[in-house]
Image: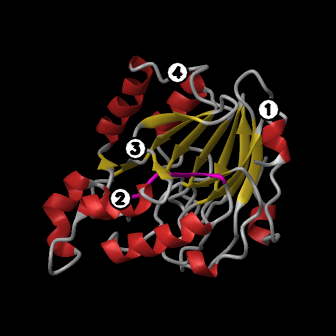
Amino acid sequence: MGEAAEAGALRFVCISDTHNRHESLPPLPPGDVLVHTGDFTNFGVAAEVEGFATWFATQPHRHKLLVPGNHDMIIDRGFYDEFWGDLTPVKEDAAHALEALTSRGIRVLIDETVELPGGVRVHGSPWVTRGPKDHSTAFMKLDGEMGEHWRGKTAAGVTRGSVDVLLTHMPPCGYGDRTATGKSTGCPHLARWVETELMPAWHVFGHIHSDPGLWRAGETNFLNAACVTDFYRVRTGGLCFTCGPSSVAAAATVPFGPQDPFLGSRPL
């Protein structure tokens, strides 16, 4: 484990929205925990999952955490059982696809909290908002359902002091959620829950390719770790931060790797 972990904190390396371009990423920075916040595939079929799992598992980081995204369709069993015919001519084994990840030591977080060595607690949730005109993809809820989902977290005890790092695929409204036209598309219910209820040290997400970077509001650092542009051009190879358990202050130092002018324009 790295020097940061020995001091009571862990170095997180964050990627998201690689869309089968993982092999094209530059070498990832060293760290203790490698996280991916969704859309590691394009069509969510078994071969794509297998290819990503093989690559992800070979990375040198000791701990590997994954929150699936709306493109990772075979991981959402309910969605896949209904819509598999839109993806492949023959229904694939969804359980085997998930096992391709978990059997390689990759922890898949679907509304789950994991405690890492040193006491750092990470919660992951994959859900994204489905708009009235959106095509149905994996892990989608309507706006009202999203509100119920995040309020339900508080009722279930996922509240302030229980989580140090939050991983979602969906961005919260106002942070890393702007489309290429400047429209804010994040979830207001998620933003409200994070800002007023959970208040983690870090919130890492993706989904919106056009607005990566780092923001800070209150006690929380918000990080959009999307690795590709809207046209799937690889932008970066991992964003990093160091975080300890709630009793240890988070170090808000984020080396972005190869500097990208777009990242350099993001507000702190």
Secondary structure state at the residue bearing disc 4: loop
| Foreground disc of the pair 4, 2 | 2
User: Which of the two discs, 3 and 2, labels the residue nearer the N terminus?
Assistant: 2
Residue 146 x, y percent position in the rendering? 36, 38
Residue at image position (40%, 75%) is 48
Coloring scheme used: secondary structure
Disc 1 to disc 3, C-alpha distance? 26 Å
Residue 212 image point, x, y percent: 66, 60
The disc placed on residue 8 is: 1
Q: Earlier in the sequence, mark 4 or mark 2?
A: 2
For label 1, the SS is loop
Asked if residue 59 lies left or right of residue 43, the reply is: right
Q: How far, Cα to Cα, is label 3 from label 2?
A: 14 Å
Q: Which badge, 3 or 4, is on the more N-terminal residue?
A: 3
Q: Which mark is residue 110?
A: 3
Mark 3 to mark 4 CA distance (whole Å): 17 Å
**Marks 1/2: CA distance?**
31 Å
Q: CA distance from mark 4 to mark 2?
A: 30 Å
Give 100 or 234, whichever is nearer the viewer.
Answer: 100
Q: Which residue is mark 2?
A: 99
- The nearer-to-camera label among 1 and 4 is 1
Q: Residues within 10 Å of mark 4 (few under 14, many from 20)?
A: some
Assess disc 1: are there few (<14), some (14-19) or many (≥20) residues with their C-alpha within 10 Å of its C-alpha: some
Query: Considering depth in this image, is 126 or 211 the residue closer to the camera?
Result: 126
Range drawn in magenta = 62-70
Q: How many marks?
A: 4
Say which residue label 4 marks: 159
The answer to which quarter of the image holds residue 247 is top right
Looking at numbered disc 1 in the image, what kind of residue is underneath it? Answer: Gly
